[in-house]
Image (tube, rainbow, N blue to C red):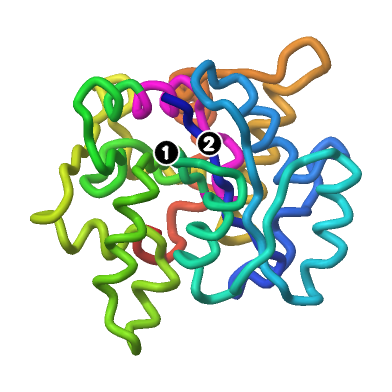
């Protein structure tokens, strides 16, 4: 059973435009995320699903330069974009990561994949019931389940088209769904390591400057949370109003 990772990313974020290409140690955020995902033992290929907009042309040129696989599709019908990307790369099982999660832990990714495999699930995630910190979000699903959930969306429901797994979450009776809860060491849902606002970028920058170097690019979620708590970095972005899950 193979698992393809799809990262959804675009340059026209409403809250922090161009965030995926903001640099830390002269490395774009999207590359940090991509490098961390390479540490997964169970992902066979990682693809970036971006948009057909001209605003993403330079982003795509960067992906080409770095030899990162990509697909271009609809900006706002993100579920359609993900389905088309999966079909192009012949992915039957998808690990979905959003581009605003550069500190994703590949061990948590693999935990979600193993849970998916061993339980023969349609959809596994770790954010529908929030115990992990926002920014450590992983979603794994069968492409067939996502296609079925897409067919359940009403034509004028743009919210369910924009948020890839919202229809999967709302129609649980049709899908075997599992939500993974963190253990006590990672049960810090009030800590945010996602990239939504400039304050988030400041926190992530401090983390990368502390951990990331030529000899060491990987650090665990446990190390991450301990560092943030020890240095009280959570104060940097604790007052930001957050949107719902994707």
Question: Observer-nearest residue: 136 or 44?
Answer: 44
The residue where tag 1 is placed is 93
Seen at 64% across and 32% down, the residue is 207
**Residue 244 inside the magenta-drawn segment:** no
* CA separation in Å, label 1 and label 2: 6 Å
**Mark 1 or mark 2: which comes first in sequence?**
2
Locate residue 40 relative to residue 171 in the image: left or right.
Answer: right
Vertical arrangement, residue 68 with respect to residue 100, above or below = above
Count of number-bearing discs: 2
Residue at 58% over, 54% down: 85
- The quadrant in which residue 30 appears is top right
**Residue 103 covered by magenta stretch:** yes
Point out residue 95 in the picture as x, y percentages from the top left corner.
Answer: 46, 39
CB atoms at circles 1 and 2 under 8 Å apart?
Answer: yes
Q: Residue at x 67, y 68 (%)?
A: 51
Question: Element under label 2?
Answer: strand
Label number found at residue 4: 2
The residue sitting at the top extreme is 215
Say few, some or many: other residues with alpha carbon within 10 Å of mark 2 (under 14 / 14 to 19 / 20 or more): many
Q: The magenta stretch spans which residues?
A: 98-113
Q: Image quadrant for the C terminus? A: bottom left
Element type at mark 1: strand
Q: Residue 18 location in percent, x, y?
A: 74, 64
Query: From the image, which quarter does the N terminus lie in?
Result: top left
Q: Is residue 59 left or right of residue 221?
A: right
């Amino acid at each position: 059973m193979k698992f393809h990772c799809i990262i959804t990313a675009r340059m026209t974020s409403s809250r922090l435009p161009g965030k995926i290409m903001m640099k830390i140690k002269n490395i774009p955020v999207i590359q940090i995320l991509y490098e961390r995902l390479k540490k997964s033992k169970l992902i066979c290929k990682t693809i970036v699903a971006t948009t057909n907009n001209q605003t993403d042309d330079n982003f795509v040129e960067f992906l080409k330069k770095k030899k990162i696989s990509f697909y271009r599709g609809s900006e706002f019908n993100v579920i359609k974009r993900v389905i088309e990307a999966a079909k192009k790369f012949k992915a039957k099982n998808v690990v979905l990561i959003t581009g605003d999660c550069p500190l994703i832990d590949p061990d948590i990714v693999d935990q979600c994949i193993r849970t998916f495999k061993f339980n023969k699930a349609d959809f596994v995630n770790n954010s529908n019931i929030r115990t992990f910190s926002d920014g450590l979000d992983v979603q794994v699903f069968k492409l067939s389940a996502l296609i079925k959930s897409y067919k359940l969306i009403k034509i004028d429901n743009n919210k369910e088209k924009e948020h890839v797994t919202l229809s999967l979450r709302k129609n649980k009776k049709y899908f075997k769904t599992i939500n993974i809860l963190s253990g006590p060491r990672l049960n810090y849902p009030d800590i945010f390591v996602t990239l939504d606002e400039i304050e988030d970028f400041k926190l992530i920058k401090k983390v990368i400057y502390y951990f990331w170097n030529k000899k060491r690019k990987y650090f665990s979620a446990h190390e991450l949370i301990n560092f943030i708590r020890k240095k009280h970095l959570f104060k940097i972005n604790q007052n930001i109003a957050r949107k719902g899950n994707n």
